[in-house]
Image: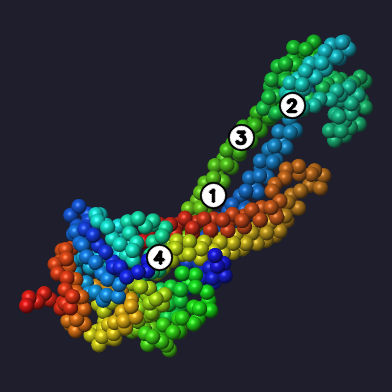
Amino acid sequence: MLRPGDGPMVIFEGVTKRYDPNVLGLDDVSLSIESGEFVFLVGPSGSGKSTFIRLLIKEFDPTEGAITVGGRNLGRLRRSKVPYLRRAIGCVFQDFKLLAGRTVYDNVAYALQVIGENPRNTRRKVPEILALVGLADKGDRYPNELSGGEQQRVSIARAFVNHPRLLIADEPTGNLDPETSIGIMQLLYRINRTGTTVIMATHDREMVDKMQMRVVGLENGRVVRDQRQGRYARVDY
Amino acid sequence: MRPRFFLAEAIRSIRANVAVSIAATVTVLIAVFILGAFIPSFLYVQSSVDSQKERVDIRAYVSDSAKVAQVNQLQDELIVLQQQGLVKEFTYINKDQALQELRERLKDPSITDYLSTNPIPANFRIKPTQAERADEIVQRLSPQAAIDEGLGVKYGEETTDKLLTVARFIQWAGLALITILLVASILLIGNTIRLSIFARRREVEVMKLVGATNWFIRWPFVIEGVICGLVGAVLSVALLWAVKVGVVDQWIEDTDSALTRDEATTIGFPVLGLMLIAAGALVGAIGSGITLRRFLKV
């Protein structure tokens, strides 16, 4: 689905999203994210971080402007093709979004079953990825038997099991204590090091300051700054 | 696609939602049972009304003083009516046969032995193609010279008219009832399915976010619907069978006098059973397939 190549992974061109005449999600946002980058989206609640992410997986379309993901113009992507877009993008959410009635193993396996992976490969890949996120021995547990950090690891395992070239995380550490958050961050960093583009919305100040990655600051739907090795708060040198 | 995977998913989902699955199955069971009891009863009543209508016959009484030529003329008119499609068939019954007919209806036939002459007129027994148009035939035949002035052309007008009114009523009332029952069952089943899917809308949302296509999500639900529909319908048919053998057949045996044969028929049980089971499966499949649509728009 995402075209290979060295061009930008994500391009926003004059993107505006208006929910209601009075409610603005994003306001004329233009930016570009290169393949392999790690980008923090920061800003207070309601600044447009979630809108940005939901636009990326085409939960809805922008009111104005164009979005390109992996060389695909999302405006030209038909509704029926949206599932294929989402398979090419790994998603991690604040509330984990795991299937409560399925074991850890089955939750991860579902992402492979969806793309029509054969059972043998599924049986090989799921334990591999569970080992990678440090849950090798928790495959037969149910989500509600795990801690928040462990559930988020499952959700990362599910997002990454297909080895997508783009991984989106919407406040992945929002519900976790600082120590657990570090573990999750390290995991995302390792995934980024494999060449995967990672976009992470967060308001975890400490984390952003520590990582020294690109920071895009949003306020009231507008990009107020974009720094290569940024900090959470604007710093004027 | 992968039928085995989808079947496994459906069974997993039934297991995970036992209470809702049972509710859906029982709903189908009740709806199918009501329909299964009502449809054959309606068809039976309909058929017995039809066979009563079949029995309507018109008698054209021939005057004892009628000349042969006049009788022939009457017969010609009947042939014309037959060609026009009003009359299905007719038979001439002479005086002796007419008397014999009467004797057969009497409890003690020997009383006719006391008659010095045969008082029963010869007549034509006429079967109309449609009971509703018997009146027309009477009007066409009455002016004929051969017709006995006193007796004329007759059919059980009052009985026939009453019968026809009742028949029409049963037809409309029956159709209306079946329609209402059908709509009610579909709504009831649809509602139960909606409830079960509503309980799992979060699950559907997550599936969509992982990149499942609509049909990938839908198939297990449809199969689940078919399973619940099938199980409900099969149980219902089994129950109907038990009621038929245990109650209805027994009752028919008790009330049937050995002399008459019930001409009215109804739908055969195997056909009815298969129809109901197919309907149960179909309603389950369509019900869950359609209801899911609303939740797939993520």
Residue type at mark 2?
Pro
Q: Position of residue A128 (x, y in %)?
A: 44, 84
Label 4, label 3: how far apart the Cα atoms are: 65 Å
Q: Nearer the viewer, mark 1 or mark 4?
A: 4
Q: CA distance from mark 1 to mark 4?
A: 46 Å
Neighbor class of circle 1 (other Cα within 10 Å; few <14, some 14-19, many 20+) is some
The first of marks 3 and 2 along the sequence is 2
Residue denoted by label 1: B182
Which quarter of the rendering shows the C terminus of chain A? Answer: bottom left
Q: Taking the image as drawn, is residue B23 in sight?
A: no
- According to the picture, the residue beneath numbered tag 2 turns out to be B128
Mark 3 touches mark 2? (CB < 8 Å): no
| A227 relative position to B250: left or right | left
Circle 3 residue: B168
Three-letter amino acid code at disc 4?
Met
Q: Residues within 10 Å of mark 4 (few under 14, many from 20)?
A: some
**Cβ–Cβ below 8 Å for labels 1 and 4?**
no
What crowding class fits label 2: few (fewer than 14 Cα within 10 Å), some (14-19), or many (20 or more)? many
Residue A36 percent coordinates (x, y): 30, 75
Q: Are marks 2 and 1 on the same chain?
A: yes
